[in-house]
Image: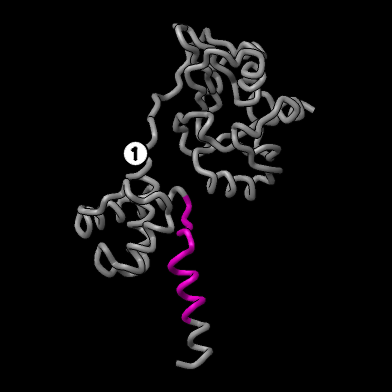
Amino acid sequence: MSLFKLVTLFIFLTISLFAYPSYSLAVKEKKIYPMGEKIYKKKCPQLHLEKYKTFDALQNDIVTKHICLKLPLKYSDALLLYLWEVKRENTHTKHYARLKVTKKDKCPICGMFLYKYPRWVARIEYKNRTKNPSFDGVKDMMKYYFKHSKNIKVILVQDYYTQETVDAKDAYYVMGSSVYGPMGNELIAFKDKKEAKRFMLDHRGKKILSFKEITSAEVYKLDE
């Protein structure tokens, strides 16, 4: 085999076998995940997903070793994304109920009525409390959190795109984008870091922060 063919083959394998498949969330939910589920049930129900610690390891077994039979690239992509992002997440991620508020609930930081802005609601749930504070966005929630960070059971935010309730400590936050919340500049939450990156590019965000990276200075800077 010529050197040119070897180089071409190497590039092809690097791109097709080891690049994480990239699709929009809408395409994934409507086409990719359902296709991947069907392939999984028909071709490899015997696969033990719990043994895979990384996406690359799973990809190598499916694409290179063909443990689920040899599949066309689009089918292997669908299978991989379904297994890693849906089946694996359902196994490892705790699911929370939709965050709901009444017409009387107000943000303890700014006093705003929360029912007017349901997609921005965030909440801190404390141990041994029946009534927990809800907020009109992550920014005000963090202001409260910095002063009341003891005896917390869980902190909940909503994914901007899907409105899914997620653990705030597992989410990613876009700062300084052109999308404003009820109180102006916001820390906009995403369950998936790839979606956070896409949002940041689409809406001129300045950076992405994990929960641990959010500081009081960063939060109050949003009010400037």
Pointer 1 local density, CA inside 10 Å: few below 14, some 14–19, many at least 20 = few
Q: Which residues are magenta?
A: 9-24
Q: Tell me if residue 65 is in the magenta stretch.
A: no
Up the image or down, 20 lies above or below 176; here it is below
- The x and y percentages for residue 98 are 42, 24
Q: Could you say which quadrant of the image residue 146 lies in?
A: top right
Magenta portion: prevailing SS class = helix
Residue that mark 1 sits on: 90
- The x and y percentages for residue 61 are 34, 62
Nearer-the-camera pick, 25 or 84? 84
- The x and y percentages for residue 122 are 54, 23
The amino acid type found where label 1 is placed reads Asn
Q: Could you say which quadrant of the image residue 133 lies in?
A: top right
- The x and y percentages for residue 19 are 48, 63
Up the image or down, 207 lies above or below 159; here it is below
Q: Which residue is at a point 53% across and 89% down the rendered structure image? A: 4
Report the side of 72 relative to 110 (left or right): left
Q: Which residue is at a point 68% across and 40% down the rendered structure image? A: 177
